[in-house]
Amino acid sequence: MSALTFELARQRYAVENLSDAHRELVLSRFGELETALPPDPLSADAVRLRIERSLDTASFRDRPPGPTEYRLSVDYDVDGVQVAGVGFRARIDRQTLSTHMVTCRDDAWFIDGFENLFRVVVAYRSFVSGSLVLHSAAFTDGERGFVACGRSGAGKSTLCGLAKGLGLTVLSDELNLIRPIDQGFALQAMPFAGDFGRSRAGSTSLPLSALLGLQHDSTPRLGGCSRAQAVSRIVASCPYLNADPQFVDRVTDRAVELVQRVPLRVLSFALDTSFWKVLDHEYPRARSAVSP
């Protein structure tokens, strides 16, 4: 059995008790995050994810028929968060965020399950460290960072496809991280994406220039949004934590702080690239990128 240590958004994660097959799969998806093991494998600065292989396949959720997408099961109790999906179940300890994953898979279903679990752990760890992971679309022109929040079907992937067609860099159409800096907020690339993104771990953070809601319209424009509506949109875009009874109030407070400093505006856009003229005009260019 072996271990890997990952560095993501200034946080360290130690993945332990990996079989050779699991190690190869994890590296195939997240190898760019690998960093040197800490001198002490139990170092307090690393969130620990322990993997256990089980031969009892009957006790796990089986793969669904037809399309491979399925809804992850997440349950909350006083001491921890329970996560389950195809071929795995896991528990995250609330105090340490240490995670125990039990799986019967050592194929592509394992790495998909591991990524789903890793997303949950990263969302919690990032929040505890002062950041927010948002279900969102993010892209950049190299100087300015744009984040568009919205539920599934709001147009995030559509917007990313249009942005890519303009030659803009798409960070992700699923999860993006926002962290506070002295001048405002930074947009941090993350390795979680759907159809567009999966940016490299070493990507430079960018100043967050725009926080956007989305709606479809034939005429591209930016509209206003009340403080209450803006907070509601942000909270709705914070996966996992917004359904956790022990975190939802804290998430709301964090969302209030964000929209106070970066007002959310609603971008109306059609199925063409005309939205970019609106954004390029409304948001001044950033002077410099921020440190990764």
Image (cartoon, rainbow, N blue to C red):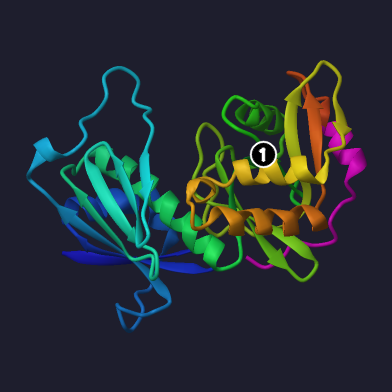
Viewer-nearest residue: 53 or 75: 75
Looking at this rendering, what residue extends furthest in the left direction? 55
Residue 200 position within the rendered picture, expressed as x and y whole percent measured from the top left: 53, 52
| Residue at screen point 37% across, 60% down | 78
Q: Residue at 67% of width from left, 58% of height from top?
A: 253
- Which range of residues does the magenta coloring cover? 276-292
On-image quarter of the C terminus: bottom right
Q: Residue furthest bottom?
A: 39
Classify residue 134 as left or right of residue 280.
Answer: left
* Label 1: element kind: strand
Work out whether 88 lies above or below 10: above
193 left or right of 28 in image: right
Asked if one can make out residue 235 in the rendered structure from this viewpoint, the answer is: yes
Task: Classify residue 96 as left or right of residue 16.
Answer: right
Q: Which residue is mark 1?
A: 149
In the picture, the quarter occupied by the N terminus is bottom left
